[in-house]
Image (tube, rainbow, N blue to C red):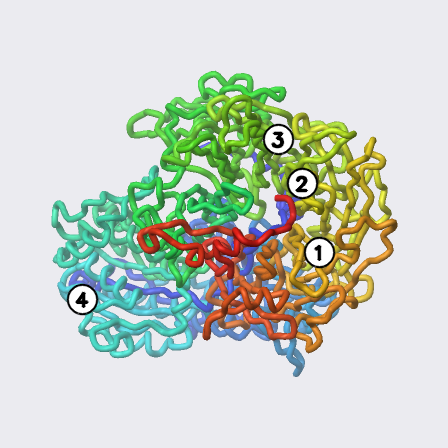
Amino acid sequence: MKRNIIYSMMFSLLAAAAVADDTELFTGTDFSAATNVVFLFDTSGSMENKVDGTNAVYDPDTVYENTRYGFESDKYYLYRKPTIEEIFYGNFDEFLDAEYQIILHNEVSASQVKCSSALNAASASGEYAGGEMAYWRNGQGWYAPYALGDNNAVDFDSSDTSAIVECDNSSYTYQGNTYDFLRDSTSTPYTNARFNRWRFCTLGICRKYTYLWSGNYLNYVSLYDEIQGREMTRLETLRDAAKDTIKSLPDNVNLALMRFDGSDGGYVAVAMKPARENYAEFATALNAYEANGSTPISESMHESLLYLTEQSLKYGHKSVAESRSGNTYVMPEDSACKVKTKVILFSDGLPQSDTGSNSDISGMTADLLPAPGDEKAPDPDCSATSGDGTCAEELAYYMLKREGIIVDTIGGFTGAGSSASTKLESIADAGGGTFYQADGYLDIRNALQDSSVKVLTQPSSYTSPAIAVSSYNSLEISDELYYAVFEPTQDFAWNGNLKRYAISSKGIIDKNGDLAVDPDTGFFAETTTSFWSDVQDGNQVTLGGAAAQQDPASRNIYTIDNERLRSFDPDSANYLQDQTLGLDLVENSGDDDPDTGISYRDELLHWIAGERYDAETGNWVAREAMEDPLHSRPVVINYSEGEQVVYVGSNSGYLHAIDTSDGSERFAILPEETLKNPNYYMTPSLMPADQKIYALDGPITYWHNDLNLNGKVDGQDTVYLYVGQRRGGHSYYAFDVTDPDNPSVLWIKHGNYTDTTTKNVPSASSGFSHLGQTWSSLRPALIKWNGSDKVVLFAGGGYDPDEDGTDEAGPESRITHDTGNTIYLLDASDGSVLWDAQSDLSPSSMTSSFPADVVPVDRNNNGYVDLLYAADVGGRIWRFDISESATSRNDFATGAVIADINTSSSDGISGNRRFYNRPDVSYITDADTPYILISIGSGYRAHPLSTETTDYQLLLKDPYGLNVPDSYGTTLTLSDLVAWSAQDAENSVHGWYLQAGTTGEKVLSASVTLSGIVTFNSYIPAQETDDTLQCTGAMGQSNIYQLALTDAAYAQADCEEGGSCPARPGETVEPVQSVVGLAPDPTITLPPADDTNPDPSCEDSSLVILSGTSTTSGHLNRCDLFNTDYWKENR
């Protein structure tokens, strides 16, 4: 169905509203070393046919008349191709008719183009395509358009000798000097100061000119139909188009040439290498191509797969020596980064003599079943007919899904709508690529160029585990693991899923007992089968898991109406207003589509119910899909033996309750505040790719009032579930889930929303005027309140998005917040505010928001919380002492800042340290003098790619210990701490700091302390100059560290020679492990008995620390666990 979408905001406003968060890991700059492209060309006998009405090939030495548009032949022209309602590039005539005024405006001279790669390409081939360029003039500064921006927003003057065109490079030379950055200045174009730089990409939004054309080439194109050339064959036309394409490509495109080999597959004519740099070698090979033989399309595609994956050759015995070692293909070493890869297949006909690889392909694809609802997936049984090319689609699908290789196809001289074109189009569909119809030199050149450049912007698919582990007791020990997975895409309407695995003595395993994680990637292995799946779902987010178990006929979906659950039925949802559903963004949403008779509103309502319209059958069918649970950490509740339910939120607006036995859904709830989100996810074009939409993306906790203390939900027990939103809003939701088949709303509390566009904004609840975005979990605890026992909820005041700043560097110094700058104590049963630190203590320094969890502690082990720790984004650590004898909220607690490590007032942005993580609090008893340890790391969670601040992992000794101070006069600073690796570190009075060893290294997750050993994860953003990190793309890497606070803790670790041991004070700290991407909080688990270790003794049962899918030794066995008395925060 096609609908007219109302774009009610201008792009400048949208860019300003673009959120800043850790999604920039997936949408920011990608530092992949290069892109690998294979040109796979048909050299069959039909390629000797003459091309009717051959047009002249572009010759840069010929000066073409400018009679049509007036482009100056010795000038160059900048342009950014649109991404919305994109003009079809192949029809350049129409393109120029629509855009020539814009292009004429952007005239520059050769001397202004300082980027030699762009100038050389445009001079040699007429165009430079796919790059990132910007334009600078004195008085104007740097400019480049956004995706929907204005190509002509600044004045151009090709005679201005000071004007500059630059590419996005790692360094620049200007007037004899070398610089690192473009300068954000109207008077000086370059700088070495990071703080003054002008960025191509900010908050995931990129501004750039992508094309540089010579005026002579534009004149040639404008007269293309009038310029007749010599008579040429199809192969000669393809050869010239390919050579000119190679000249125009950006520097970071690697290319390999492959061709058909008569009737027997194909072979490598030129091995993978930088395209433009090796133009002469490619041209020589292309010039040697001769037309003969048949059209073995699938055999040649199969050979390209074998080459790209370094397998044994099948048909490629003529492949050049550089491409193989004996009979095994080899790829350049820099391809070990698994860079983005594409095969571009050109053919002029249907497959012929093309059955030799059918059995091989059928064997590879037998276990690769399509994801539910994947309409592009081919028939899995391709060998049934054994005809020519019958397995080509299956092979393309396999290449995409298993190897991440995109397949584009070009139908050369086949004629639109022909059988050959239809076949090639279906291959491209299955391979996740694009089909191009090309019937002449310019068509082929444009198709090759467009396809080669598109691979650079093809979004990478990451099967990235979110923070998601089941928990069965206070130590979170269980063999069941629940991973929330998501798949970033360009439009931010990300797919998601919930999958179950297990922990064993071998590591993380799947339902078959096989290791589930690929050690090379840190993601789930391709051959993995998660517990609820019937097929190998591996690293495919949309395959298997809970998403595949959702049956619309049995789903129980609820919306919230006046704080009551209301059963949702798409056929009787008239109570939901159009504006509530976001339908004001869609014209005529209630009108029936002329083709289907279904209105957009009805389509949306059925989408919410989990259905999509099947045009072939005319029926509503299950869409079997979930959306991304980006930060929502699943929580498991034990109802009885054999009955557990896992709860997880998604950014399309749902709270899902999933039965752990089979992955089926018990119920789902959509709050009114997030009811616009399904519309954005069903129609991603409603919002730009630069703005992520959130919903129930926050923490989930629960309180099981276990009256008979049997660990089951029975008798008069109650179970209350508490849900936050993170960036999805300023609300907390409490549900009574005592009966998971009959949930109800317990209470809802709202703060003052800052997003008034994508949310249905509620009125703020009484007492919650300071509530920020609800990042902090509601942590149940037992206290004495007015002399009686009371279960309460502690929470940080939330996050103030003002801390995001306007770019990835953020504010240069600590700023003052008026949202989220408090600590809340809530009644667990009705959500009312019992105590508010801002209102009841009025501390003058409580000027920063508290997004992290607060940590309640029972210091005297009497069962009641009497101590509280919290950290704010201003770099402060707070301590609150709670009185068990308090009679009112006024004397409930005292407290103050006990540490402040933000030094931005003196050091500027390098000292603007922030805490987004909860403190990790432990009582260290085996030291000479016992102390309360507070372990916490600093880092800018809103901008993980930032590198301006020097961050630390801190291990502080609470200056007040177990005592309740009469006053709070001590505030620790960095100068009170000792560097962990210093010679006298073990004698530190107040604690230690560990400085990050790599630029931009920061700590974005909480640590865990076990028996005096601290485990924490750091994050290092990808650096363009770091060869190791280039392989991770923009995801960067995490280092896992372990520190032993005392000699006794180190001795307990029982380090073996060559093993990874925790570092003691005074020792150099090295990572015990490094993983791709941002690792979540470390979580403790204890592998159970299994086939490998069926009856483990307590010495053989060691705790394992999970960081996502990575496992690290906890240096603690079951004997230590049971024989040691632990004092720690109340969790």
Residue in front for this viewpoint, 1048 or 678? 1048
**Image quadrant of residue 317?**
bottom left
Disc 2: which residue: 773
Mark 4: secondary structure = loop
Please tell me which residue is depicted at 68% across the width and 73% down the height of the picture. 192
User: Residue 932, which numbered label?
Assistant: 1
Mark 2: secondary structure = loop
Please tell me which residue is depicted at 57% across the width and 27% down the height of the picture. 707
> Rounded to the nearest whole Å, what is the CA distance between mark 3 and mark 4?
60 Å
Disc 3: which residue: 733
Comparing marks 1 and 4, which lies closer to the viewer? Answer: 1
Disc 4: which residue: 314
> Rounded to the nearest whole Å, what is the CA distance between mark 2 and mark 4?
58 Å
- Taking the image as shown, residue 539 lies to the left or right of residue 1123, namely left
Within 10 angstroms of label 4, few (less than 14), some, or many (20 or more) residues? many
Please tell me which residue is depicted at 73% across the width and 69% down the height of the picture. 988
- Taking the image as shown, residue 404 lies to the left or right of residue 751, namely left
Mark nearer the N terminus (2 vs 1):
2
- Taking the image as shown, residue 381 lies to the left or right of residue 794, namely left
Q: Is any atom of residue 454 visible in this view?
A: no
Residue 915 x, y percent position in the rendering: 69, 54
> Rounded to the nearest whole Å, what is the CA distance between mark 1 and mark 4?
66 Å
> Rounded to the nearest whole Å, what is the CA distance between mark 2 and mark 1?
30 Å
> Rounded to the nearest whole Å, what is the CA distance between mark 2 and mark 3?
13 Å
Mark nearer the N terminus (3 vs 4):
4
Identified by mark 1, the residue type is Ile
Residue in front for this viewpoint, 252 or 189? 252
Mark nearer the N terminus (2 vs 4):
4
Identified by mark 2, the residue type is Gln
